């Protein structure tokens, strides 16, 4: 490919993609509306924990990567891959404004033959209806005839070390057979295994199914956790034994609630679209209900643990271990830690947090009340000083042994103390 590939939206999905293309000797131009991110990248810095700055710098040194806010440079690109956010609106309806805005911004610059690929997670029909319309109206060209259009879902699993983007099979659906072939050619240089499907809609549906599968299974283990606890059985021990079955089972783990940019959000994209077809999505909604109730279950255990030590929840001092939604990442979007924090503070507790990857809570629409709150160091004095330590994320490198020794009370939602002293007077799972 002589011309570069453009990647739009340099976040958790777009930036690793740029790095992988650059590594496989493809030139990449990264586009973002955030000038700060663009400046950082062009000076060889990273703002994502699991993308080392050296990766960016070596792509810069090899002259295979640059970042820009100038969308007119789309005209230089052979292909354009869109990785912008797809959040939910106020009423938990899909918000595809970022995709449409991007479509409108790039439309005047795409050339005859450009391949446009959407990677953002969304409901079936977005690519061949909503995005297509924005591109055709803005370019005066016809998709599938003058330029190519495809959908290929992202399967990035931030923080995962055993596989990288290159080794994860990639599903692709095109608007026409030629669109599919052209999209495959874009990824062939960087991805080992491509999985072509018949339409963009099938590819969109694949992504939603993968995430709904996780949401439903996590809800199931969360429900079993509550049921088994009432029977005096530890769900973690059950899972460890069940996963030795070599077929027909795969482990999912309970937690304090769902987090991240995908699992709490994507199922609602399908629920919303299903209504248009008069279909209900009972499984998805039930899973959502169970998962959303988990922070309440944890708060009940915190309150009971404090009572067992003669302390009311009100005015108690709690140190929450973990703000990121999962281990070893710095991503706090939709983290259940915030739901817990809100509930505990509303009940009168005083909550601080420790998270080595979240030094300060950034301003956001969802968690404005916590903006500016800072990470508390995890020292023996601090572990002792709080009435209770609540483990919400199991990051590596946290000294759980010290916490087991020093903390007055521990409520553990992540099974972080395996093999450590679990004194029944002070250690509680939730
Ligand atoms: N994070 C994940 O693990 C993950 C995994 C699979 C799929 N996805 C999906 O990928 C998509 C992107 O998610 P993400 O986690 O990378 O989001 P992100 O918020 O980390 O990154 C999005 C980037 O897009 C930029 N942006 C916003 N509007 C833009 C515009 N109009 N033009 C150019 N840039 C714009 C933002 O500044 C940001 O840098 C979403 O649809 C998400 O559901 C995410």
Image (tube, rainbow, N blue to C red):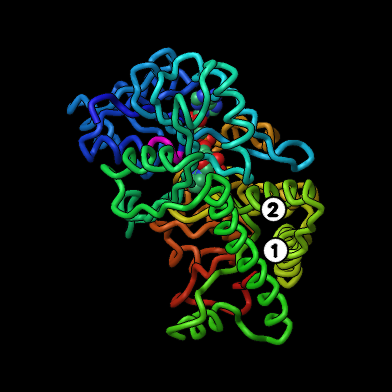
Vertically, is 72 above or below 307? above
In the image, residue 414 lies in the stretch drawn in magenta: no
Proximity of marks 2 and 1: CB atoms separated by less than 8 Å: yes
In the image, residue 15 lies in the stretch drawn in magenta: yes
For the point 31% across and 40% down, the residue is 185
Position of residue 314 measured from the top left corner of the image (x, y, whole percent): 79, 54
**Residue 180 sits in which quadrant?**
top left
Front-most of 325 and 310? Answer: 325
Vertically, is 344 above or below 364? below
Vertically, is 375 above or below 407? above
How many numbered marks are there?
A: 2
**Residue 284 sits in which quadrant?**
bottom right
Quote the CA–CA distance across marks 2 and 1: 8 Å
Q: Is mark 2 within 8 Å of ligand 1?
A: no
Position of residue 399 measured from the top left corner of the image (x, y, whole percent): 42, 60
User: What are the residue bounds of the magenta stretch?
Assistant: 12-16
Left or right of 58 on screen, residue 35 = right
Query: Label 2, on which residue?
Result: 340
**Residue 21 sits in which quadrant?**
top left
Query: Label 1, on which residue?
Result: 298
Front-most of 280 and 420? Answer: 280
For the point 27% across and 24% down, the residue is 3
């Amino acid at each position: 490919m002589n011309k570069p590939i453009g990647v739009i939206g340099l976040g958790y999905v777009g930036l690793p993609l740029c790095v992988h293309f650059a590594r496989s000797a493809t030139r990449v131009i990264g586009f973002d509306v955030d000038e700060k991110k663009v400046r950082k990248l062009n000076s060889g810095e990273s703002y994502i924990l699991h993308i080392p700055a050296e990766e960016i710098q070596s792509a810069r040194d090899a002259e295979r990567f640059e970042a820009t806010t100038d969308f007119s440079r789309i005209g230089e690109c052979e292909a354009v891959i869109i990785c912008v956010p797809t959040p939910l609106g106020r009423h938990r309806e899909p918000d595809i404004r970022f995709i449409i805005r991007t479509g409108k911004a790039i439309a005047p610059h795409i050339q005859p033959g450009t391949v446009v690929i959407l990677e953002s997670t969304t409901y079936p029909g977005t690519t061949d209806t909503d995005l297509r319309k924005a591109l055709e109206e803005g370019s005066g060209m016809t998709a599938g005839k003058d330029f190519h259009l495809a959908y290929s879902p992202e399967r990035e699993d931030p923080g995962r070390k055993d596989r990288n983007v290159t080794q994860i099979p990639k599903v692709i659906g095109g608007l026409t057979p030629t669109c599919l072939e052209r999209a495959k050619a874009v990824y062939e240089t960087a991805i080992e295994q491509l999985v072509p499907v018949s339409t963009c809609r099938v590819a969109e549906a694949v992504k939603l199914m993968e995430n709904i599968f996780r949401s439903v299974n996590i809800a199931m283990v969360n429900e079993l956790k509550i049921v088994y606890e009432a029977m005096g059985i530890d769900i973690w021990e059950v899972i460890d034994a069940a996963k030795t079955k070599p077929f027909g089972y795969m482990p999912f783990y309970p937690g304090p609630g769902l987090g991240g940019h995908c699992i709490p959000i994507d199922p609602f994209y399908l629920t919303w679209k299903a209504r248009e077809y008069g279909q209900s999505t009972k499984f998805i909604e039930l899973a959502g209900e169970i998962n959303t109730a988990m922070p309440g279950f944890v708060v009940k255990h915190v309150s009971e643990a404090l009572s067992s030590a003669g302390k009311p929840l009100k005015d108690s001092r709690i140190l929450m271990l973990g703000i990121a939604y999962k281990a070893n990442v710095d991503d706090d979007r939709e983290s259940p830690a915030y739901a817990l924090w809100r509930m505990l503070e509303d009940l009168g507790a005083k909550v601080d947090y420790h998270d080595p990857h979240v030094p300060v809570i950034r301003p956001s629409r969802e968690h404005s009340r916590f903006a500016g709150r800072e990470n508390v160091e995890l020292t023996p004095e601090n572990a002792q000083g709080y009435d209770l330590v609540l483990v919400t994320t199991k990051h590596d490198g946290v000294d759980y042994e010290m916490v087991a020794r020093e903390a007055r009370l521990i409520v553990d939602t992540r099974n972080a103390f395996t093999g450590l002293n679990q004194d029944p007077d002070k250690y509680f799972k939730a």
